[in-house]
Image (cartoon, grey):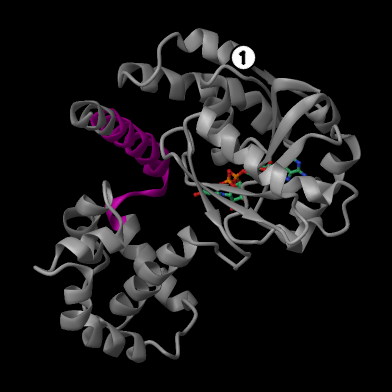
Amino acid sequence: MEKRKIAVVGAGLVGCGWAIVFARAGFRVNVFDVDPSIRAAVTGRISAALADMEMAGLVEERETIAARVTVEDELRSAVRGASYVQESVFERQDIKKDVSSQIDAVMHPQAIVGSSSSGIPASAFTEHLKNRERFLVVHPVNPPHLVPLVELVRAPWTDSAALASVRELMEEVGQTPITVRREIEGFVLNRLQGALLNEAWALFEEGYASAEDIDRTVRDGLGLRWSFMGPFETIDLNAPGGVGDYAQRLGPLYHKIALDRRDPRPWSEALIRRVEAERRAKLSPDELAERRAWRDRRLMALVAHRRRMITEEQ
Ligand SMILES: NC(=O)c1ccc[n+]([C@@H]2O[C@H](COP(=O)([O-])OP(=O)(O)OC[C@H]3O[C@@H](n4cnc5c(N)ncnc54)[C@H](O)[C@@H]3O)[C@@H](O)[C@H]2O)c1
């Protein structure tokens, strides 16, 4: 096993981002995807992202970084000898189970395997594995090379030393790990995101505001603070006496809001079509990829700004 060799299995949006995270930190990265057309696109996608990152001042020597990534035609050759494997295949329990079995069969027994799973806990797809104590969820935010948070979520059988070792690795490669103390569907990040999304769909469905105005409320309101502080710190600063004072003043309002939503409905087909119509009127399907690249460039500028802020505060 080579300590500085990483395998990335599944090279879509998230897998390519992970390859950049590890290569940028000096690791050799083997990438595998089951789809040959995706494999063929990996090098170009990574090079394009690195070029934008260089323009934003986030990386130097992009060619050296890109050269650390190798695309492999077989899962076995990608995983063999790697000390850490980041699985980033489709969010489906059956596929995660199957791919985890394939990795389990060829991995070094001391290697660790992190799944990018957005919400399926590792216990749902790793129980049957011979190295199951080396598997856990390492859930990133998209794109992982620009947004540093990762959630570490162990299954009941994950070894504590493996968890500690992944935490160290994530810090070494510049990510910000949090530990979710026990498994829960959606973990912390997507439960928070889900609370906001469910309310957004409900407010839209009930006709209180347009999708555009709901987006604007986050973009020009809540989101500005959220780019550098979380909800607890936000409310701690939003009442003269801090979080306790805030809870006294506004706790009853939030309780009433929660009581309003005790019987949530699934997002219906008709509702999805209405939101989609509003979004597609603003952004046609063939503009989605360019808008995604624009989003990444805005994120790069924000990351560069945050770095300057941190340096100035020190
Ligand atoms: N997109 C996001 O916002 C986001 C954020 C965090 C985590 N995730 C999670 O990351 C994982 C990947 O999501 P994504 O958005 O990159 O999806 P994606 O569709 O862009 O990529 C998934 C890739 O997995 C490959 N794949 C499927 N089966 C495979 C197999 N058997 N072996 C090897 N490769 C296989 C597919 O060919 C595809 O390229 C999912 O678990 C997802 O929930 C996604």
Which residue is at a point 38% across and 68% down the rendered structure image? 197
Q: Is residue 89 left or right of residue 288?
A: right
Q: Position of residue 146 (x, y in %)?
A: 41, 34
Whether 304 is among the magenta residues is yes
Location of residue 73 with respect to 199 vertically, above or below: above
Q: Quadrant of residue 240?
A: bottom left
Q: Position of residue 147 (x, y in %)?
A: 41, 40
Q: Is residue 105 left or right of residue 217?
A: right
- Let me know if residue 94 appears in the view: no
Foreground residue among 228 and 51: 228
Q: Position of residue 185 (x, y in %)?
A: 60, 67
Q: Quadrant of residue 194?
A: bottom left
Which residue is at a point 46% across and 58% down the rendered structure image? 189
- Let me know if residue 261 appears in the view: yes
Location of residue 92 with respect to 292 vertically, above or below: below
What range of the chain is rendered magenta? Answer: 281-305
Q: Which residue is mark 1?
A: 68
Q: The N terminus lies in which quarter of the figure?
A: top right
Foreground residue among 148 and 63: 148
Q: The C terminus lies in which quarter of the figure?
A: top left
Q: Position of residue 102 (x, y in %)?
A: 86, 42
Q: Residues within 10 Å of mark 1 (few under 14, many from 20)?
A: some
Foreground residue among 267 and 296: 296
Q: Quadrant of residue 123?
A: bottom right
Foreground residue among 249 and 23: 249
Which residue is at a point 70% across and 22% down the rendered structure image? 5
Number of marks present in the image shown: 1
Under tag 1, what secondary structure? loop
